[in-house]
Amino acid sequence: NKWFSRSFLNYLLGLTFLKKHIDTSNIHRVIEVGGGFGSLGEILSQAGEYSYVDIDIPPTAAVSSYYLSQQSEITLLPYTETRNLETISFPESGTQLVLCPWQLPQLQGDADLFVNFISFQEMEPDVVEHYLHQADRLNCSFILLRNLREGKQQKKENTLGVETPTLAGDYDHFLPNYQLIATNVNPFGFRTLDGFHSELRLYQRTENNWIELLTKLHSWIV
């Protein structure tokens, strides 16, 4: 006797995919580009002690600010409280932050997880590369993406689309400091009849892998 939106269930599929491949106990600081009306923030507000940053364009940022402000479990800092700040600190646990894209370079601090569900496929590759560069700058340990494996349809006369589709392999190129550790279309994504498959991709920061390897080697030597 409960109702869930399709967006909510898509996020739960993505988080289940994440938990299937990594230990999520160390993930507490989450940043998302294109959070829509705030589904992921709502899930995190009920899942434990997380800090969450949502980057989105207006007026969507205003919608998500209102939606997330209705969650009693968290403290929300909306755009109106950060718009004049030159430096924006990553929020503390239990606090959520809604920013507009031009504020992202001002965000400071390390993050554990960067998320984008679907909206990257609507962007041109150089815009996607910019956002992923920011994820790298924030030292995100993991990057979780949901995209069209074959890329968005190209814009043609009298049809909507993108100038240049962002393909699955482009993400590998845009993330030189990360390695792809898992992909999935079924059951965590969505396989369609028209040949455009919704795919989940999970990346891990390679520096973390080297640190873990060196730590293990040191323990063996000692």
Image (cartoon, rainbow, N blue to C red):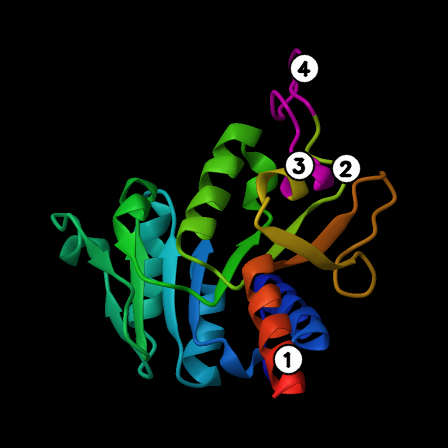
Q: Identify the image quadrant of residue 161.
A: top right
Q: Which mark is first along the chain, 4 or 1?
A: 4
Q: Is mark 4 on a helix, strand or loop?
A: loop
Q: What element carries label 3?
A: helix
Kindly identify the amino acid type of the residue bearing the numbered disc 3: Asp
Q: Which mark is first along the chain, 4 or 3?
A: 4
Q: Which mark is residue 156?
A: 4
At x 46%, y 43%, the residue is 133
Residue picked out by circle 1: 216
Residue picked out by circle 3: 170
Magenta part mainly helix, strand or loop?
loop
Q: Which mark is first along the chain, 2 or 3?
A: 2
Q: What element carries label 1?
A: helix
Please state the extent of the stretch shown in magenta in the rendering.
154-171
Task: For marks 3 and 4, give the CA distance.
Answer: 22 Å
Residue 185 pos. (x, y %): 80, 56
Kindly identify the amino acid type of the residue bearing the numbered disc 4: Lys
| Rendered view: 35 above or below 51 | above
**For mark 2, does the 10 Å Cα neighbourhood hold few (<14), some (14 to 19), or many (20 or more) residues?**
some
The residue positioned farthest toward the top in the image shown:
157
Kindly identify the amino acid type of the residue bearing the numbered disc 2: Glu
Q: Identify the image quadrant of residue 159.
A: top right
Q: Please say if the residues under marks 1 and 4 sit with CB atoms less than 8 Å apart.
A: no
Kindly identify the amino acid type of the residue bearing the numbered disc 1: Lys
Residue 82 pos. (x, y %): 17, 55
Residue picked out by circle 2: 150
Mark in front: 3 vs 4: 3
Given residues 194 and 206, the one toward you in this image is 206
Given residues 143 and 147, the one toward you in this image is 143
Q: Which mark is first along the chain, 4 or 2?
A: 2
Residue 99 pos. (x, y %): 30, 52
